[in-house]
Amino acid sequence: MQFPDDDNGQMLQAMSDSGMDLSRAMAVDFFLVFADQRDAESALEDLTATGHGDDVELNFNDEIEKWEVIVSVEMVPEYDAIVAKETELNDFAAEFDGMTDGWGVMQHQDGDAFADNDDEHECDEHCHH
């Protein structure tokens, strides 16, 4: 599979290389960051009211020292769909003085090569779980 040479394309390539089935819907987590807690809480309330994601949560990210709203969307992780959702959420976050800060997926999801063989998996120095 060939992906564009940007951050989104590189993430999708890494997912494909790890054995994830990118033709299946999965929970994709989009990260929105806010400097002010009230802005993050307002964004969270609006997201919940308008149904922008299947699941939303608010956390304080100690690493970047910002409030983070995680928007989980059940979708097939196609490049154009990811870019469109990121753009939509970035425009949304800007209304609350925030911005998007990437996306990701849980490494082991139903249907990927690792989840299907988890009972047979033996950890080694390359494991990341």
Image (spheres, rainbow, N blue to C red):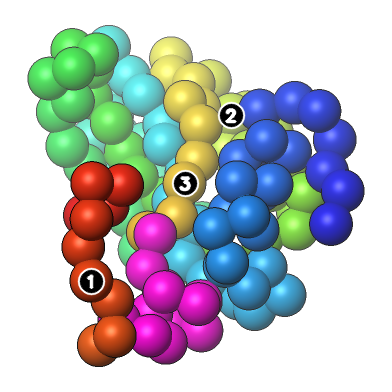
Q: Position of residue 50 (x, y in %)?
A: 48, 58
Q: Amino acid at mark 3?
A: Gly
Q: Which residue is mark 2?
A: 90
* Residue 54: assigned label: none
The reply to whether the C-beta atoms of the residues labelled 2 and 1 are less than 8 Å apart is: no
Q: Which element type, helix, strand or loop, lies under badge 1?
A: loop
Q: Give the answer, above or below, for where 20 lies relative to 72.
A: below
Q: In the image, is residue 55 above or below residue 45? A: below
> Which residue bears the numbered disc 1?
122
The residue to which callout 3 is attached is: 104
Which is more foreground, mark 3 or mark 2?
3
Q: Which residues are magenta?
A: 107-118
Mark yes or no: residue 81 visible: yes
Q: What residue lies at 21% left-to-right and 62% top-to-bottom?
A: 123
Q: Quadrant of the N terminus?
A: bottom right
Secondary structure type for disc 2: helix
For the residues marked 3 and 2, what is the alpha-carbon distance in whole angstroms? 15 Å
| Residues marked 3 and 1 touching at CB (< 8 Å) | no
Q: Nearer the viewer, mark 3 or mark 1?
A: 1
Q: Is residue 93 visible?
A: no
Label 1 packing within 10 angstroms: few (<14), some (14-19), many (20+): few
Left or right: 104 in relation to 128:
right
Quadrant assignment, res 23:
bottom right
Q: Based on the displayed image, in which of its 4 quarters is residue 92 positioned?
A: top right
* Label 3 Cα neighbours within 10 Å, binned few <14 / some 14-19 / many ≥20: some
Give residue 59's position: percent from left, percent from top: 17, 37
The quarter of the displayed image where residue 5 is located: top right
The amino acid on which the numbered mark 1 sits, given as a three-letter code, is: Glu
Q: Is residue 82 above or below residue 121?
A: above
Secondary structure of the residue carrying numbered label 3: strand
Q: Viewer-proximal residue, 57 or 64? A: 64
Answer whether residue 128 is magenta in the image.
Answer: no
